Every structure is written in structure tokens, then in C-alpha cells.
């Protein structure tokens, strides 16, 4: 059975009503939402067959945030997404995730034909796996994409503050020796470490495991730079207790960097955070040698 429910998420009321009129005349059931936050709220209890999604939704959450939530949630495996944008230079950021990308202005015949074609299941919706099946954290590739989007948003909004934080865990066994995160016997400890990170960061934060015991977070929409230190202190606190059976203690070393308008690429903030982590690890190693 075809799902004719169409959700239009567009902050321009005139354009939204235009889309609604066109698709309603085509026999579709159309609902309009005028902000990203309304869109998130509606999607928490609704699974439309098609979503018309504007990429620039005022000064709040971007359309790309909604798109990534849709593609990372199996509830929407049968939902098609048409991205509508007036900024062709942003298309590459979502081209692999949207079923179609339309550049404004959008013609009546074009919109009607494409919407009906997608809802008729002439091709399946695009689906992507953004989460690691073991830890349920986001994949590192997903993290990189989110970082690119945060960088682009930072260029558009001077007040948009974000940070990258790297956490390197040194997990020791009952014998005091390092625990290898890649061993099958270490999986329960890895899952527990991931669970602690997820429970102590915001749902909007992007958390990924880069490799071994190294985790990375992207923390967006911070109010001030000091919020980064609050996050770090919270994470350091939750790892004071052992991860479980087979692990006697956990030591956490971190490196962090906040958004800087002088960064030329999204990777610059990552390089700064990695450098800070390397310096911290070197200091930790010197301190350990001194104790010995």
C-alpha cells in the first residue's frame, strides 16, 4: 500500500503553501511544518512516505540535521526525501542521502511528477548505516560529514559555536596490563565505555569511535567556549569507575579545540584537537616514567 502522506518542512510560508497546494491537487495528503524543530517533533511520531525538505531553515537547526536523522533511523527506511534548496553550492553535502535534489524555483509539473514517481516506489529510498553495530556510536565517516556541515554552518553564522573533543582511554586489566580494545574478550568493556559516553553527552552531540579506545565527539550549538570544559569534566568523572569485570581502572586523556573563524577547512579543528591530545599523551607518559 502506497504511503501518500507528504511532510513539507520549509520555513518560507509562501513556498510551503505553494508545495502544499500543488501536491494536494495531485491527490496526496500534505502536512506543512515551518521550522526544523517542528519537523523533529512531528517525525518522532510520524513516518511519512515523502518528505520535502528545505536545506536552509532559518537560523536554527539545518535541514541537513533532519536528513541525517532520517537516514540513520530504520523507521524511515521506506521514506523518500526530496531536498529543495536555493543554494546549488550546498548540494554536494547531501547528494548521497537525498533521493532527489531540486533547485528553487521548482515548477508545478516537475514537483508533481517527481513526487508521484517516488511514492509509486519506482526506486527504493536511499538508506545508510551511520552507526557501528557493536557500540551503537556513529561511524567515523559519519563524524567527518557532520564536521564538514558544522564548518559550513559556522561560515554562515558567526554566533554558531562548536567543538571537537578527543578522548583516549587507557584501560587496564586486573593485572595492570593494557586491555586491547580489538580483542573479542574486550567487547563488553568497549560497549560499556560507549554507553557511558552516550548517556553523558547531549542527544545532539555526534560521538564516534575512531579506533581502539579513542573516541571523538562533535559538540554543536555551545553557548560559550567554556561549555567544552564542562563536557570534558563530566566525561572524566564518569570514567573514574572501572568499566566492569576484567578492567581494574581507566585513565582518560583528552585533546580539544573550539571553532575558530581562522580555520580554512573543517579538518583544521580536527588537527588542532589531535595535536592537543598528542601533547597531553606525551605529558602523561613522562609523568608515568617519573613515578616509576
Image (cartoon, grey):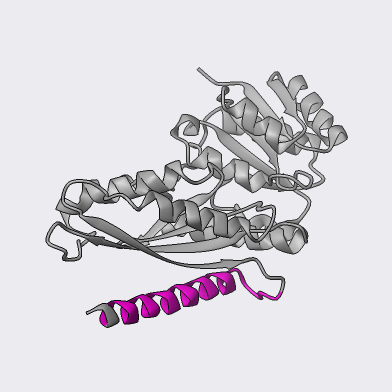
**In terms of secondary structure, what is the magenta stretch mainly?**
helix
**Looking at the image, which is closer to me, 103 or 230?**
230
- Relative image position of residue 97 (x, y in whole percent): 55, 48
Left-right relation of 58 to 175:
right
Position of 39 relative to 240 (above/below): above
Residue drawn where x is 22% and y is 46% of the image: 244
Residue 228 falls in which quadrant of the image?
bottom right
Residue 164 falls in which quadrant of the image?
bottom right
Left-right relation of 27 to 169:
right
Residue drawn where x is 30% and y is 45% of the image: 192
Q: Is residue 277 magenta?
A: yes
Quadrant where the C terminus sits is: bottom left
**Looking at the image, which is closer to me, 31 or 146?**
146
Position of 6 relative to 272 (above/below): above
- Relative image position of residue 93 (x, y in whole percent): 61, 57
Left-right relation of 3 to 262:
left
- Relative image position of residue 31 (x, y in whole percent): 71, 23
Residue drawn where x is 67% and y is 44% of the image: 63
Q: Which residue occupies the extreme left position in the image?
A: 175
Query: Disc count in the image?
Result: 0
| Residue range of the region highlighted in magenta in the rendering | 262-289
Residue drawn where x is 48% and y is 77% of the image: 275
**Looking at the image, which is closer to me, 196 or 66?**
196
**Looking at the image, which is closer to me, 150 or 279?**
279
Amino acid at each position: 500500500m502506497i504511503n501518500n502522506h507528504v511532510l513539507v518542512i520549509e520555513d518560507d510560508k509562501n513556498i510551503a503553501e505553494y508545495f502544499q497546494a500543488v501536491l494536494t491537487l495531485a491527490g496526496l495528503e500534505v502536512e506543512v511544518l515551518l521550522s526544523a524543530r517542528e519537523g523533529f517533533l512531528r517525525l518522532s511520531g510520524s513516518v511519512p512516505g515523502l518528505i520535502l525538505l528545505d536545506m536552509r531553515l532559518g537560523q536554527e537547526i539545518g535541514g541537513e540535521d533532519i536528513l541525517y536523522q532520517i537516514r540513520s533511523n530504520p523507521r524511515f527506511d521506506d521514506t523518500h526525501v526530496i531536498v529543495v534548496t536555493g543554494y546549488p553550492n550546498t548540494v554536494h553535502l547531501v547528494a548521497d542521502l537525498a533521493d532527489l535534489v531540486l533547485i528553487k524555483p521548482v515548477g508545478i509539473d516537475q514537483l508533481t511528477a517527481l513526487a508521484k514517481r517516488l511514492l509509486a516506489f519506482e526506486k527504493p529510498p536511499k538508506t545508510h548505516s551511520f552507526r557501528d553495530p557493536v557500540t551503537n556510536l556513529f561511524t567515523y565517516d559519519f563524524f567527518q560529514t557532520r564536521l564538514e556541515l558544522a564548518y559550513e554552518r559556522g561560515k554562515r553564522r558567526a554566533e554558531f559555536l562548536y567543538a571537537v573533543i578527543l578522548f583516549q582511554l587507557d584501560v587496564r586489566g586486573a593485572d595492570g596490563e593494557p586491555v586491547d580494545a580489538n580483542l573479542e574478550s574486550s567487547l563488553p568493556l568497549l560497549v560499556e565505555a560507549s554507553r557511558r559516553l552516550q548517556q553523558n553527552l547531549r542527544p545532539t552531540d555526534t560521538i564516534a569511535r575512531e579506533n581502539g579506545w579513542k573516541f571523538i565527539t562533535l559538540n554543536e550549538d555551545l553557548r560559550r567556549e567554556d561549555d567544552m570544559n564542562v563536557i570534558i569534566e563530566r566525561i572524566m568523572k564518569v570514567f573514574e569507575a572501572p568499566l566492569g569485570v576484567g578492567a581494574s581502572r581507566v585513565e582518560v586523556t583528552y585533546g580539544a579545540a573550539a571553532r575558530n573563524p581562522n580555520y580554512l577547512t573543517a579538518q583544521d579543528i580536527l588537527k588542532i584537537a589531535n595535536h592537543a591530545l598528542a601533547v597531553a599523551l606525551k605529558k602523561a607518559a613522562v609523568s608515568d616514567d617519573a613515578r616509576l
